[in-house]
Amino acid sequence: METSLLPPSQRPSSSPLRRRQLAMVACIVGALCVVAISSWSPSNSLGLAPVLSRTTLQIRPSTAGRNTRVSARANSHWMEKLGAGAAAFGLAGAMSMGTPMPAVASEYDVLDASGPTTGYIMDDAPCLQKGSEKKMNDILSYLDVGKGYKLDVVTVRKLEESPDADTLASKMLDKWSNKDKSNSAVLVLVVKNSEVGLAAGDNFVKALGEDKAASIAQETVGYFANQGRPNQGVSEGVKRINAILTGETDPGAPEIKEYRKERTYKTKEETDVARGASYQVVGALLLIAFVVPMLQYAGYVQKD
């Protein structure tokens, strides 16, 4: 069993779970202070309401209203400051002891990056699972070291400067390819509108094939992204690229299921025909309801 030899003052700080618990306690204490202070008023605490009312009756009318208003304003101002201070204390405690919130991602973060943040992948959206990201990095590492083809993957939430995904992919290829641009490529997925871009050098395109590149971008990555599964789309796209560049059989694009939507409403012509038939039925019933009793009545009269 290992024993720490450091003095208490130099030992590592508490675990992240302990810090989050302290942050939660600080937030709760701050909120309770604000609620308690905002609900307290001098007129109904410590049993002073009767005393204040009796004292007010003994003050002359010319000064009672003014003194009471000044005292109320002073108390209210003091209580507001104290409540704001308690809220600020709780918020500061949560920010200092809790886990910091991640910054909002944008296209500019990608453009400013000198390279992918995790291996060959920059999940700026973010939309990739950690397990899938690790598997893809293993595949891309083998593709780079073993076959000499470098593929970087970028996901971004939305575009803010580039007009389309292909433009962003070309920018990142120029920036990240270094000297061997001919054997490099960048795959970009814009999650907001499921747009996919693939920019590659000459040798990369020749080995992959333009038709296969278009199929991977649109029929694999874009297809799954459109269904709300961007993680699966990127993973399957990387697998297809790896299979083609390593000489294996391309698994191909997923089978696209087309759902035929049947019409559940009637057209105007069908409605008019049904309405005409209804009118005829109602008219016939009304005619029978009037004519049959009259005929019966006429028969009774003739018999009499």
Image (spheres, rainbow, N blue to C red):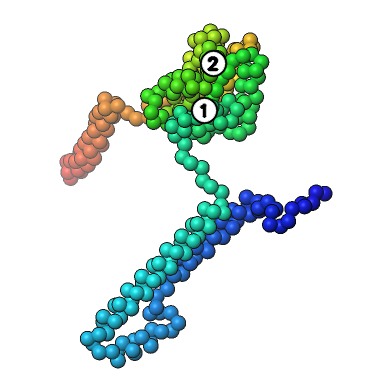
Residue under numbered circle 2: 179
Give residue 81's position: percent from left, percent from top.
Answer: 40, 67
Distance from the alpha carbon under mark 2 to that under mark 1: 14 Å
Residue under numbered circle 1: 114
- Earlier in the chain: of badge 2 and badge 1, it is 1
At 63% from the left and 51% from the top, the residue drawn is 17
* Whether residue 62 can be seen here: yes
Q: Going by the picture, which residue comes out furthest to the top? A: 206
Helix, strand or loop at disc 2?
Answer: loop
Left/right placement of residue 59 relative to residue 103 reads left
At 22% from the left and 42% from the top, the residue drawn is 293
Give residue 243's position: percent from left, percent from top.
Answer: 62, 15
Give residue 61's position: percent from left, percent from top.
Answer: 23, 87
- The amino acid type of the residue labelled 1 equals Ser
- Return the residue nearer the eye: 82 or 113: 113
- Return the residue nearer the eye: 30 or 192: 30
Quarter of the image that includes the C terminus: top left
